[in-house]
Each structure stands twice: as C-alpha cells, then as structure tokens.
Image (tube, rainbow, N blue to C red):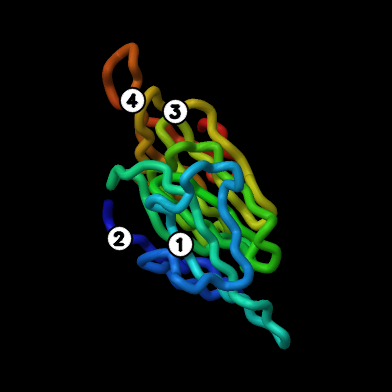
Amino acid sequence: MTGPTLNAAFPHTWTAEILPNRPLILPSRQFVYPAYAEEIERGALEVLIRTPGEQPAQPFLATCALGFRDPAAPTGLWSVPHSDWLCALSGGYAYLINSLDPSQFTMLPYRPVLSVHPLPEHNLILFTGHHAILAWGRDGQAWQSERLSWEGVAIDRIEAGAIHGQGWDMLTDKDVPFTLDLATGRRL
C-alpha cells in the first residue's frame, strides 16, 4: 500500500494529521467510521482532526476502517467543496465527515473508490469506482453516472464542461470511450 495522500485543493476550515498508528493516549472525542465495522483498528486510517473558532472544540480522532490493502485503492485525506467537511479514504473506502459534527458522515457506496479527482473550478470532487463515477458538491451528492464499464473506469481528461474517459465492455472485450456532462453526469 502506498503512503496516505493529503489533497487540499478546496478551501477548508479544519486541520488534520494522518497518524502512523493509533495514539497510546486517546483524545476525549473519538469517532469510528463506519460504526458497525468489526476489527476496525487493524489497518485503519487514524486521523486527528481540529476545527477553528473562538472556542474551538477539542480535536477528535477519526478511525476509518480499511477497505482493501491493494495499492490501487487510495488512502488519504481530501478537502471537498464544503469547507467544514473532509473526505477520508482508507484502502478505497470513502468517508465524508463533517468536522464540526463528526457524528454526521456519509460512506460512499463505491467499494472501492479507485481514484479521486478534485475540481475546485467546478465545485465538485469526482470519485471513480469499477463501474461508474460519483460527483460530490457543496450540498452532497451532485450526481452518479450510469454504468460506464464492466470493470474499470478511467478518466482521460476534463475539458469544456465534459468528462472524457473509457470503460471496459465485456461483450467486445475492449475499452469503449465515453463523454459525460460535468454538470449532470449524463452521457453526451
């Protein structure tokens, strides 16, 4: 597995430190994502998150369950279009967390997320999975594409309000190009 990524393409109000291990002395506020995971500590992404303010809250520890130990599944932190939220990926499992109220989170349905594409100029962050693309905006999920591939979506470029990429077609055993409208996720 490659080392964790920190991508702060969007403005954000929080600061975060990816910890190499679970701290021996735990902060008073701890959150586990998802709450129902078994053996969460084994390989989990441990992140210490702080928020600003006149009376800032105590930092909290976010423990994010590991998805896959495959180097193709990203691990790290990304800022997102909403400045109070962050995205933590742990082996391709993506958790969007409200830094002001860490009990509010969303776990993306892609297991795993295979790539992340921050697009601050469009106020979107794109997540690719094996079959489709999901766009996240300031107010949450903006859109999800139709199935683009049987196994593996690749974004080649984003220009003029369109996403150009390829997806593998099982019937022809070939990569087939696609173009999506960046605003809606619909095929062009």
Judged by depth in the image, the label closer to the viewer, 3 or 1, is 1
Q: Which residue is mark 4?
A: 168
Which disc is residue 3 wearing? Answer: 2
**2 or 1: tag closer to the N-terminus:** 2
Instruction: Residue 22: name its quadrant.
Output: bottom left
Which disc is residue 46 wearing? Answer: 1
Tell me which residue sits at (37%, 42%) in the image: 68
Tell me which residue sits at (52%, 62%) in the image: 120
Q: How many marks?
A: 4
Residue type at mark 4 is Trp
Q: Secondary structure at mark 1?
A: strand
**4 or 3: tag closer to the N-terminus:** 3
**Cα separation between marks 3 and 1:** 33 Å
**2 or 3: tag closer to the N-terminus:** 2
User: Tags 4 and 2 in contact by the CB under 8 Å rule?
Assistant: no
**Cα separation between marks 2 and 3:** 29 Å
Residue type at mark 2 is Gly
